[in-house]
Amino acid sequence: MALPQLSQDMSPEQFDKMVGNATRASNFLKAISHEGRLMILCHLVSGEKSVTELEELLSARQAAVSQQLSRLRLEGLVTPRREGKAIYYRLADDRPRRMLEVVYELFCSDEAS
């Protein structure tokens, strides 16, 4: 896949599309730029988790976990499901998983060292 390039002969529509894509990508990157949100996504890769489970996994308070989940939900990265008093979260689509694979390859694999 070739990366888009700005050029003098780009139409206003092409430029506007590129700006829109850059805005969407920037919002996505901001949403995952917090280590707490990134760790939540890492835990959700293995499947749906309740807020209580995430609190325990992250050793974090409920308010902090809920705040980070709210931002991830706002960006469309996670989806909630209520069961009685418990709220469960799962990845909304494959974007977070694909992004985590790239992050792992860049920063965590043996080749990144």
Image (cartoon, rainbow, N blue to C red):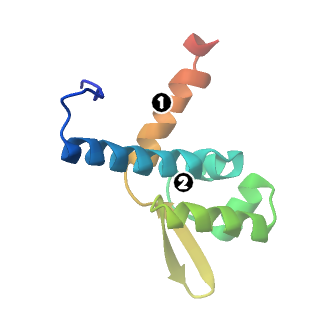
Q: Earlier in the sequence, mark 1 or mark 2?
A: 2
Residue at 61% across, 24% down: 107
Q: Is residue 104 above or below residue 34?
A: above
Q: Nearer the viewer, residue 48 or 32?
A: 32
**Residue 102 disc label:** 1
The crowd level at tag 1 (other Cα within 10 Å; few <14, some 14-19, many 20+) is few
- The residue beneath circle 2 is 44
Q: Check disc 1 and give the amino acid type.
A: Val
> What separation in Å lies between label 1 and label 2 (alpha carbons)?
16 Å
Return the x and y of residue 28 as percentages of the image width and height.
Answer: 49, 49
Q: Nearer the viewer, residue 24 or 102?
A: 24
Residue at 68% across, 69% down: 66
**Residue 67 disc label:** none
Q: Check disc 2 and give the amino acid type.
A: Leu
Residue at 18% across, 40% down: 11
Left or right of 89? Residue 8 is left
Location of the N terminus (image quadrant): top left
Location of the C terminus (image quadrant): top right
Q: Is residue 24 above or below residue 82?
A: above
